[in-house]
Amino acid sequence: MDSVTLMKSFLEPESIALIGVSRQSGDGTNVLKNLLSYGYSGKIYPVNPNAEEIFGVKAYPNVRDIPDKVDLALLLTPRMTVPEIIRECARKGIKSVIVVAQGFAEADEGGKTLQQEITKIAAGSGLRIIGPNTFGVANAFKNLSTSFGALWKMKKIPVGTIAQSGFLFANIPQSMIVGKAVDLGNACDVSFADVLEYFEADPDIQLIAIYIESVKDINRFITVARRVAKKKPILALKGGRGESGLKLALSHTGSVMGRDEIWETVFKRCGIIRVEDIDELDDGIKTFLSLPLIRGKGLAVITYPFACGVLAVDACQKYHLELAKLSGETLEKLARLFPPWLSLGNPVDLTPPGFISGKDTKEAFRIILGLVLNDPNTDAVLFCVPSSRYGQIYAYSEIVNQYADEFSNKAIVGWFYGFDPYRESAIKYESKDKVAIYPTLERAIRAISRLVERYKFLNQVE
Amino acid sequence: MDSVTLMKSFLEPESIALIGVSRQSGDGTNVLKNLLSYGYSGKIYPVNPNAEEIFGVKAYPNVRDIPDKVDLALLLTPRMTVPEIIRECARKGIKSVIVVAQGFAEADEGGKTLQQEITKIAAGSGLRIIGPNTFGVANAFKNLSTSFGALWKMKKIPVGTIAQSGFLFANIPQSMIVGKAVDLGNACDVSFADVLEYFEADPDIQLIAIYIESVKDINRFITVARRVAKKKPILALKGGRGESGLKLALSHTGSVMGRDEIWETVFKRCGIIRVEDIDELDDGIKTFLSLPLIRGKGLAVITYPFACGVLAVDACQKYHLELAKLSGETLEKLARLFPPWLSLGNPVDLTPPGFISGKDTKEAFRIILGLVLNDPNTDAVLFCVPSSRYGQIYAYSEIVNQYADEFSNKAIVGWFYGFDPYRESAIKYESKDKVAIYPTLERAIRAISRLVERYKFLNQVE
């Protein structure tokens, strides 16, 4: 079975058997109750020998008693029961099984043996397994989630997530996005490469985010990831960097590959963008969904407090970003806004036009942003200004969005200085998905550097 | 004049002359209007030859026309007028002058000459200068700010800020705190050491935050900073790390010292905690004002999604933090909550008690947190759990705060997984200033490492 057909049976099933689903609703931890509340439109077959029906849905004592075809079986029973139930699923003709239970290769010797046993059953029967030790799959486009934890909200965003953890399974922490997601758990069978190939062909998905601790078939992973990365950005968060982390990853998903340096090479070779932390997954999604790729020839910084310019330059050095050398023409035009004794350059200080030359600060910002965007030596602009919470003089969102339309090949990003607890300012600036605002100055610079990184990968620039 | 008396004249003046203050109110950029709105209780003398009164306050054509004693003069006039006005201030017997204007050593050759000239006038007359190129001072305890930019709010927090920039002058970006603050600007006269000595003796101040690009008298800086750091934590953000940053810092405040490695040594020798970015200033203030210092013998991690444990361990390695080796007694008691096949350790996974052993997750959290805090091998605990926005099962703030009372010598910090846009969860946890919640997992770990760093400095542990 090709990966697309395979993964469709997991992510777009027309019928699901919930084997071992409880009659209790718990704290939003009942997958049947969750599926009903999401509005999943496929058929649901609860399997529980102690119930005639659960939440109004007819239940069956055993999977073999289900009268219809079942695309996907979700196994919610304890580990010892899993091999026999998988055999029953195979006999029933079910091709796709998610094994939720913990207690396999990540646990004790008995668990390792159990995992080998179910892998063998799968190989012998043609049935495929996601897991064990997994939350399963989620697909906002089908109102589907097999996680026993209720999702706060489902959102049809063009992001596909693959994680060796329920943690990033169906949502990146801060943004709680969903799109489509697969938790591979111990990955005894279905692998990163399988899901990558599905997302590669999926018109709903524009960007792929992965949380990875290890892979079994590294060669296939590299081949597939490199091909997919040429079509869609892949962001990877690697868990288990150092020795102790690696050891822990071993106890988590029961497998391990090697030192972090090897991973660094793998990611680079594949054109996978390795993010530094969880938050960069959030940032990266915004970055690649709203900004153009850039060659990295030059960043211009417009800053209200000049010290932010100094700190921005420090961050550029850290992330190997070039500051733009503004053209003579730009500097000449800028000079009209500034007192004659000020040596003009990049970063451009927004203070003097407002406070020394007596120009309106908002108008000065409009002119300066236009000039640096027009400069042939810039392909990105970072502005650091007080948040709009300070008042209308700093409410530049319309100005910035107009320029974003006009200069669609340049990346315009911002960072706000000052208290903005509800992200009020940021939301206005980002409302057209053409400008990105980052919570910190360093994260803004880092995001721009990722646009350059991807540009270089796609254009094979070293 | 000793530093305390000197700085009192700047930060606690009983009378201020505002020389060159405008009759226009501008966009909240009129310092007189601002002072009146803050409720500053000292005497204010606007000096403006074109006005009889400004905003209802009697104005004087020249500083010499003011009939009373003036503690502090704020010079708001253009650079060329500054030397003559300083001479007039000296003749009037004013001891403390803030020079706001730009266009001195940070600008052109003419500016350098001007700065030398005013420094010479000061030295000859005994008058002292803050600036030029500065916002001046702020003191929430006196409802005073000399910044022409209106402060969003004044807060009497025990934090003293010293910055070579208006940027961090009176507020750390996200938290907009004030306390007391000095913007040294080009620092032609009053220096970091002067303000450090004032904060050293100030009972209102418990922690000092500085933004530094350079100092002139490095020996005095080291002597004073090392002494002050033994009494109060000093957090430093250094602007101008690399070559280009240094060059820019030069153009910003007109002075430069040396390579970043030298600064690293200076900070270390002084026991100054060097923060990595602006956000760590925010974090650091919370860290040192609400958590106990710890020896760093062991961090325990309690995590709901286990992958967060893996990432926490990676962050511990980055910040040289030891994971606690839980005692046999703790592990034995923990085992009662977990299935027998699970190998228990640190991080402690909160998932199995809730989902496998059928225990209530909240109760399991209460028991586990108590056990790890009781363990003699821990002195800090990090918990990574879904935010309370998910529901009452994750609302652990009462549990955590009760333990914070009981185990006041251990640092308890948290990070929330999931959408919490209004920091609702964090605010509840932090309401008693005994627990700190950080916006990212890495920042939580970094904060704990700073507690250890300071403990080691104070106890001379290498």
Image: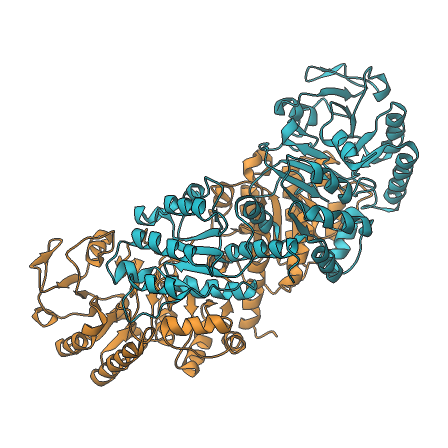
Chain colours: A cyan, B orange
Query: Residue A218's spot in the image, x, y percent?
Result: 80, 52
- In this rendering, is residue A53 above or below A337? above
Say which of B391 and A391 sits in front.
Answer: A391
Q: Residue at x 24, y 55 (%)?
A: B29
In the rendered image, residue B415, in percent from the top left (x then y), is placed at 57, 48
| Residue B414, image x, y percentages | 57, 49
Q: Quadrant of the C terminus of chain A?
A: bottom right
Name which residue lies at 60% across and 73% down: B461
Vertical comparison of A271 with B359: above or below? below
Q: Is residue B362 visible in the rendered structure shown here?
A: yes
**Is residue A56 shown left or right of residue A389?**
right
* Viewer-closest of B50 and B333: B50
Number of numbered discs overlaid on the protein picture: 0
Q: Furthest-right residue in view?
A: A124
Residue B177 in view: no
Residue A50 in which image quadrant: top right
